[in-house]
Each structure stands twice: as structure tokens, then as C-alpha cells.
Image (cartoon, grey):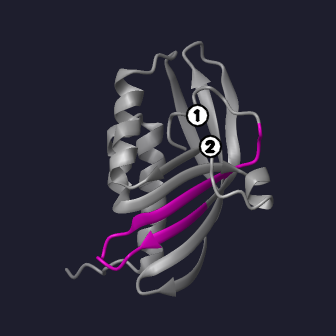
Amino acid sequence: MLMKSKSPGEQIEQLLRDYCHALDEGQVDRWTGFFLDDAVYQITTRENIAANYPLGIINCQGRGMMEDRIKALQTANIFESHTYCHVTGPLDVREEFEGRHTVRSNFVVYRTMYTGQAELFASGKYLDVVDTSSGAALFAERIVVIDSRCIDTLLVYPL
């Protein structure tokens, strides 16, 4: 039986599903594996984008900075037990240039604390550049634009 290879759009959808499932399952060790070595990961606010401020709340340049972030999360940060649930909207896949695609999707993330109480943790949009040139989709850039200006202390966890 011949296996049909996935189109770039299917690869991108799979990347975003795997990313959210990994984080929702607490597999934070897998997080950096969704990015190219020189990728950018940034969390910023809608207000920052509107004012054209270049820096975000979190700004990782390269996988090494992301790995440091995860190491700090696992060894230095102290917080109550909780889980996340990502809900994403339909993808808007746009331009392609040399295997790179710009992708936009809206999201909400719910957090459930150890007490069982669930609450809306974050909402916003992902502005991604996804590279499919190697046959596997990876983030070249992930800009997380959150709607709120109120930042939770546990924003250290990737969105």
C-alpha cells in the first residue's frame, strides 16, 4: 500500500496539533523540538503590536534560549500543580516562499488548578512562520499575541 505524503498544509496542521497536545499533556521537554535551531519565540500583547513595539514579554532567539527556559521551568520555578488545555481556531495559511508559510490562528488556553477549578488563562492569536522545506514542518518563528495586558505569574510556561 502506498502512503500518500502530506501536503505542506497537512504538515502545518499536524505541527500545530502536536504542539498543543504536547503542552496540554505536560510534555514540556518536547517543546523545543517543534522549532528550527535559529527560530524565534516571542510572547507579546496586542497593545505592543498596535504601538509597533519590537520587544515582547518573552523573547527567545534560538532553540538554546528556549531550552534554558524549560530548564528553569523544571528546576527553579515553584508553582502549584495545574494543567492546560489549548483550543485553536481554523488556520489561515498564506504566503509560501522557499518552503516557508505564514500562518495565523486564534487560540484560548484554559488552566485547571490542582483544586479542579478551571479558568481562562490566555486568549489571542498565533502568528507563525512555518518551514516545510525539509519535509517536516517546524516553526521558524512563533509570535504569540495575547489579548490581555494582565500577565499571569505562570506565563513562564509556553503558550
Choose between 55 and 42: the one closer to the eye: 55
Q: Which residue is outermost to the top?
A: 115
Q: From the viewer's perspective, is residue 138 above or below residue 68?
A: below
Query: In the image, residue 68 lies at what x, y percent?
Result: 35, 38
Residue placed under numbered mark 2 in the picture: 57
For the point 48% across and 59% down, the residue is 16
Image location (x, y in percent) of residue 44: 65, 49
Q: Is residue 110 magenta?
A: no
Q: Secondary structure at mark 2?
A: loop
- Position of residue 85 relative to residue 50, above or below, is above
Q: Which quarter shows the N terminus?
A: bottom left
**Quadrant assignment for the C terminus:** top right
- The image's mark for residue 44 is none
Query: Disc 2 or disc 1, which is closer to the eye?
Result: 2
Question: Measured from the top left, where is residue 8 in percent x and y?
Answer: 43, 78
Kindly check if marks 2 and 1 are in contact, taking CB atoms under 8 A apart as contact.
yes
Residue 42 to residue 97: above or below? above
Residue 91 in view of the camera: no
Q: What residue sits 50% from the left and 17% below the top?
A: 79
Secondary structure beneath disc 1?
loop
Front position in the image: 81 or 89: 81
Q: Position of residue 19 (x, y in %)?
A: 44, 52
Find the magenta span and give its range: 127-149
x 61%, y 48%: residue: 87
Provide the residue designation for mark 1.
155
Q: Of the residues shown, which amino acid type is indicated by label 1?
A: Leu
